[in-house]
Amino acid sequence: MNEIVVDLAACQGYGNCVIAADDTFDMDDDGLVLLLRHQVPATDLERVAEAVSSCPVQALSIRRDDEH
């Protein structure tokens, strides 16, 4: 399965990812991204990839199955 990778040092808490995919991303008490799931099934990949791309500081990425 495709895996979401988070760089918490880069996260600035914009929350774009939460708006785009609230079933995958949330914000913790410090205002940083919190993963609700680490792996993304192929059926949700396009939508979650758009959420990842919406991060203005590129704190999120997806390690795709074909990259292993």
Image (spheres, rainbow, N blue to C red):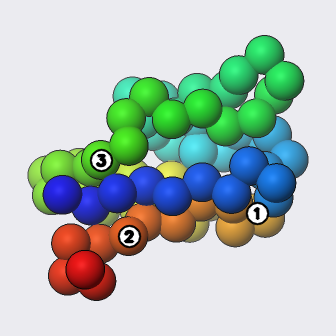
The amino acid type found where label 3 is placed reads Gln
The residue indicated by pointer 2 is 63
Image coordinates of residue 37 in percent, x first then y, are 37, 35
Seen from the viewer's position, the closer of residues 43 and 8 is 8
Secondary structure of residue under mark 1? loop
The amino acid type found where label 2 is placed reads Arg
Specify few, some or many for label 3: CA neighbours under 10 Å numbering under 14, 14-19, or 20 or more: some
The residue indicated by pointer 1 is 56
Seen from the viewer's position, the closer of residues 34 and 15 is 34
Q: Earlier in the sequence, mark 1 or mark 3?
A: 3
**Distance between the Cα atoms at labels 1 and 3?**
22 Å
The residue indicated by pointer 3 is 39
The answer to whether residue 33 is seen in the rendering is yes
Secondary structure of residue under mark 3? strand
Image coordinates of residue 13 in percent, x first then y, are 80, 40
Secondary structure of residue under mark 2? strand
Seen from the viewer's position, the closer of residues 11 and 21 is 11
Specify few, some or many for label 1: CA neighbours under 10 Å numbering under 14, 14-19, or 20 or more: some
